[in-house]
Image (cartoon, helix red, strand yellow):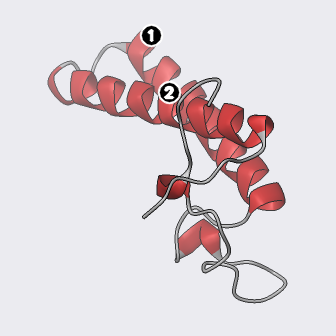
Amino acid sequence: MEAVQCDPRQLEVLRRIMQLEFECVDLQLFLDTHPQETCALDAFRAFSEQLCDAKREYEAVYGPLLNYGFGMAPNGWQWICDPWPWEINWRRGA
């Protein structure tokens, strides 16, 4: 499967989503063993909200990230539209 070039803004939003997902998973793991840490819980809530916002922003412009959940498109089935997130050429300057 060949990588597809895409809009630089699309890459920017996808990178932000990946960063926020990493933050959420990292904080979730920390909170599993430190549930009383209110600063970590506040950070988790803030990152989770930012992640939801970033996913909504991406999907409003570029289509669904998933074939279920938030991925349901109001104007029909868009899951098959190119490029899928894993088909993007992530090499900078390429």
Left or right of 73, for residue 82: left
Query: For mark 2, does the 10 Å Cα neighbourhood hold few (<14), some (14 to 19), or many (20 or more) residues?
Result: few
Residue named by callout 1: 39
Q: Marks 2/1: CA distance?
A: 19 Å
Q: Mark yes or no: residue 35 visible.
A: no
- Position of residue 15 relative to residue 40, above or below, is below
Left or right of 88, for residue 7: right
- The residue sitting at 42% across, 22% down in the picture is 41
Residue named by callout 2: 19
Q: Mark yes or no: residue 5 visible.
A: yes
Looking at this rendering, what residue extends furthest in the bottom direction?
76
Where does the image place residue 5, in percent across and percent down from the top left? Answer: 67, 47
- The residue sitting at 46% across, 26% down in the picture is 44
Quarter of the figure with the N terminus: bottom left
- Position of residue 94 relative to residue 86, above or below, is above
User: Of the residues tagged 2 and 1, which is closer to the observer?
Assistant: 2
